Image (cartoon, rainbow, N blue to C red):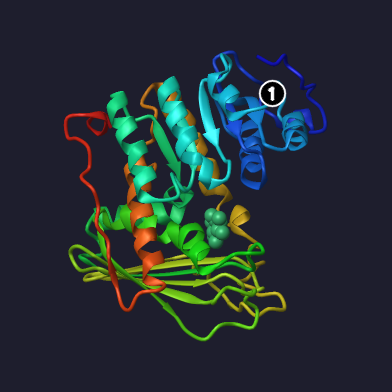
Amino acid sequence: MTAPQNTPSGTPQSTAPAAAPQDIRVGVIGVGRMGADHVERLSRRIKGARVSVVSDYLRETAQTVSESAPGSRVVDTPEEVIAADDVDAVLIASPGQFHRDQVLACIAAGKPVLCEKPLAMNPADAYDVVRAEHESGRASVSLGFMRRFDAGYGELKDALEAGELGTPLLLNCKHRNADVPPGFTNVHMVYDSAVHEIDAISFFLEEPVVSVQTIIGRSSENAPEGLSDPMLLLLRTASGTVITDELYVSTRSGYEVRTELVGSQGAATIGQETGLVTTQQAGGRWGGAVPADFRPRFVDAYDAEVQAWIAAVADGSLVAPRSATTWDGYVAAAVCEAAEQSLTADGAVEVSLLERPGPDGARDER
Ligand code: ISE
């Protein structure tokens, strides 16, 4: 194992909580934009945890990020992070194509893991993880669909569970980004962006999506080459709730996520601020600044998600009650695959799911 290399420096020490011996020691795999953000929150705001080991395929990046996390060290590979004696739990923020193997390695090593979405790049790979976790005998994988920890999402979920809105009839979602990285296509729009609303369906409605259709119309002049933007997803659940998801990812104005649930007894909306709301390109406003991207918009949700995960690791339950699970990751992958197929199909594509493991195994313990 590599010797400790990091001398805490570069970040004001006064804002970091003092490390306690019983802190959960977290190994972070992948410290690009999202991983670095998680290292920062684990080091500054999350109670009961500290970052002990980091890795990134760019060693220099790992070194820089490690310097902002007092007491952490850098290793060369994800395997070393997972195997490290000073890692109690693993946070995966590497690119999605590595998630399946890295989560499987965590399960094999018996280490609880919080993996950023997606769980895997296709349903078959995601199902491999579902099965491996089931066979391990206990739920230990949390999936980073952070919106489940957003206050507004939580209130809407509570209202639904309390029956305040009656039967859910429609779920209308909007997902707008200021811009997207070069090379972003409509397939990325499904797997990277719409996947959040697809998980929100599981979270709010707790029933499977049975069909999905993508609709592409006139494209914005802001859209990069190779992308038809905006795009609409039309989904239907087993009991007949209809979901619309508007994706527009090159607005040039800012980050907007809105969700409206229309129930038989009332409607509820998340993300619609009060006061004058404009979203024009020259500085959209809603009584303050429109957030530039998802990090400021969901900072509290990310904090709550990671704090809940650390608490679950500390108390031995390993997966927080509202967290997305491997099964949720598999369902999201299956719906995304159908949405991708619908990009070139005529009409809606059916979603079919494999059997969920249980009821006598891992999921029972939750
Ligand atoms: C990005 O990967 C995210 O996860 C953001 O939450 C989402 O809004 C964005 O569209 C994705 O590209």
Can residue 321 be seen? Answer: no
Q: Nearer the viewer, residue 279 or 185?
A: 185
Q: Nearer the viewer, residue 73 or 169?
A: 73
Position of residue 126 measured from the top left corner of the image (x, y, whole percent): 37, 44
Q: Residue at x 65, y 29 (%)?
A: 54
Could you tell me the amino acid type at mark 1?
Answer: Ser
Q: Residues within 10 Å of mark 1 (few under 14, many from 20)?
A: many
Position of residue 153 measured from the top left corner of the image (x, y, whole percent): 41, 55
Question: Could you tell me which quadrant the C terminus lies in?
Answer: top left
Q: Which residue is mark 1?
A: 72
Q: Residue at x 39, y 35 (%)?
A: 320
Left or right, residue 248 beside residue 355: right
Query: How many marks can you see?
Result: 1
Q: Nearer the viewer, residue 306 or 353?
A: 353
Q: Nearer the viewer, residue 179 or 125?
A: 125
Q: Quadrant of residue 55?
A: top right
Name the residue at the bottom extreme: 218
Position of residue 272 measured from the top left corner of the image (x, y, whole percent): 49, 69
Ligand 1 shows up in the quarter that is: bottom right
Left or right, residue 348 beside residue 116: left
The image shows residue 232, relative to residue 108, as above or below, that is below
The image shows residue 308, relative to residue 291, as above or below, that is above
- Secondary-structure class at tag 1: loop
Question: Could you tell me which quadrant the N terminus lies in?
Answer: top right
